[in-house]
Image: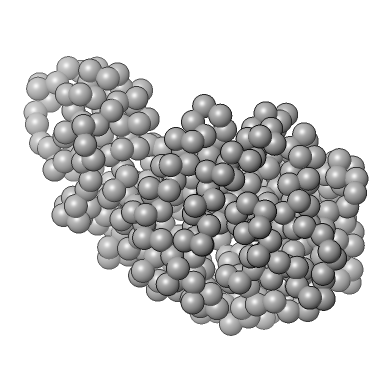
Amino acid sequence: MIDNPVVRDFLPYLTGDKLYFEEEDLSESIISLFLKNGFLVEDDRNELEEIRETYWKARGETPVSYTIVTTMDCNLGCYYCYENRSKHQLESVDIDVIIAHIEKTFDGNFKRSLHVDWFGGEPLLNVAFMEAASLRIQEFCEQHGITYHASVVSNGTLWPENVTEFVKKHKIRQVQITFDGIKESHEKIRRYRREFQEGKSSFDEAINLINELANYVRVDLRFNISPLNQHELIPFMDYIEGQGFFNKKYPVTFFPAMVSAYTEKSAFVRKEEFTQKEYDGLTEEIGERLKGIGKVADANNPHDFPFPKNYVCAALANDSHVIGADKSLHRCGLEVGEKHLAVGHFTDSNTIMDANKSWWDKFDPCNLPSCSKCSFLPVCFGSCAKKHFDRDQHSLDAVSEFWKNNLSRMVSSYLNYTLEGPPNFTEKDQFRSGYNS
C-alpha cells in the first residue's frame, strides 16, 4: 500500500507519459516499493514475457471446472436470450461418459478439487438428470480424494420445495438468479412460455427462492440493464434492501450486467446496448446507492485490482470443460448450442473440431498486435477471449474505452485518494510505447 503523500507526488506520473529518472533521485525504500509493485521497471526488463509467463501459468494452474448444460430448453422466453432453445437434454445414459471424461481430466493431474456449474437453458428443467449426475460425480470425487462443490445459474422458478436439503445434498455453494426490473417489467421480459404457463409470478418465485437460499449459500443477484428498465435500477435496489437481502447470513451480491449481443443470434440487441460511458455512469450510480449497504460485483474489474491479473476465465483454463446438452464439447459457456463452434463431442474422443480447438489452445493476448502494445494488458489480459474468437471489434473497443475512462479513478479509489477531475487516458496513452520485447 502506498500512502497518500507519495500518491500526491507521483499520481501525475503514474497516469501520464513514461518517466525516466536516475536511482539517486528517490530513496531506496521508495524505489524498492515501486519496483515490487510494478510501477517502476528497469529499462532492460522484458515486461511482455513476464506477462506471458503469468498468463500461461494461470491457464495451467486454474482449478478443474466443468460447466454441465442439463438442457437447452427453458420455461421462460426472454426476448434477448442468446441461446438456441431446443429439446436437447442430457440423459441418465450420459452420466457414465461424463464420469469417464472427468476421470481422464484428473488422470495424472496434481489438482484435487472439482467445481461443477449447472447451466442451461434452465438447468432445473432437467432436475432428475442433474440430481443423478451430481450424486455420481460426488461419489467419484470421494473415491479419489477430490474436493467437490457446485454452483447453479438459474431463473429461480423451478426449484424443489425443500431448498435447504437440495443445496446441502448437491453441495451447492453459489447460485446466480437474474432479474430484469421490478415485478411488472420483470414479468414482461421473463414471461412464461405458453407450454410452461403455470399461473405463477416469475418475479415472486425468484424473490422467495433468494429469501431461502441466502441463509445457506452465496447468491449473485444479476440485474440485466437495458434502456427499457434503467429507470427501475434504484427502485429495485430499494426493494431488495427492504427484503433484507443484504442482511442475510450470506448477504446477497448485486451483479449489474448490460444486456448485450453475446452471439450472432442476439445481434439484434446491439441497437439497444448502452455505450460504455453510459454503462459506467449506471454502475457508478449503483455503487453510490449500495455504498456501505451491500456488495456490488463488477465484471470489468479484475480480482485484487490494481495488482496485475494472475487468473484466466474457465474458457482459457487447461482443465475446464463445457459439456453441452447436445453432447458437444465447448471451451466457452456462451457457445453452448452452437455445434459449429464446438471443440469436440464428449461421447467420442476422436471427434475433434481441430480449427476451433487449436484456436482456444493457442490463444495468447501477448501475441496480438494491439494487446501486446497496450498499457492495460497486465490488468486486462486481452479481455474476453470469445470477443477475439468472434472478431467482435465493437465489444473490444468498448473494453478499451472502459479502461481509458476508469483506470485512473480505480487506482486512486483503491488508494483512498480523490482525483481533481477525471484524468482519462487517450489512445496515445494506451499505446504509448508497448512493452519491451
Q: Quadrant of the C terminus?
A: bottom left
Q: Which of 183 and 436 is in front in this view?
A: 183
Left or right: residue 412 compared with residue 95: left
Residue 240 visible to the viewer: yes
Residue 400: quadrant of the picture:
bottom left
Q: Which of 211 and 175 is in front in this view?
A: 211
Residue 381 visible to the viewer: no
Please give the name of the residue rendered at 58% of the width and 67% of the height, measured from the top-left corner: 334
Percent position of residue 209, x then y? 78, 46
As drawn, 434 above or below 412: below
Please give the name of the residue rendered at 27% of the width and 20% of the height, measured from the top-left corner: 4
- How did the renderer colour the structure? one colour
Q: How many marks?
A: 0
Q: Quadrant of the N terminus?
A: top left
Please give the name of the residue rendered at 45% of the width and 68% of the height, measured from the top-left corner: 272
Left or right: residue 417 compared with residue 224: left
Percent position of residue 344, x then y? 64, 76
Percent position of residue 402, x then y? 34, 52
Left or right: residue 297 compared with residue 427: right
As drawn, 245 above or below 315: above
Residue 424: quadrant of the picture:
top left
Please give the name of the residue rendered at 53% of the width and 57% of the height, measured from the top-left corner: 229
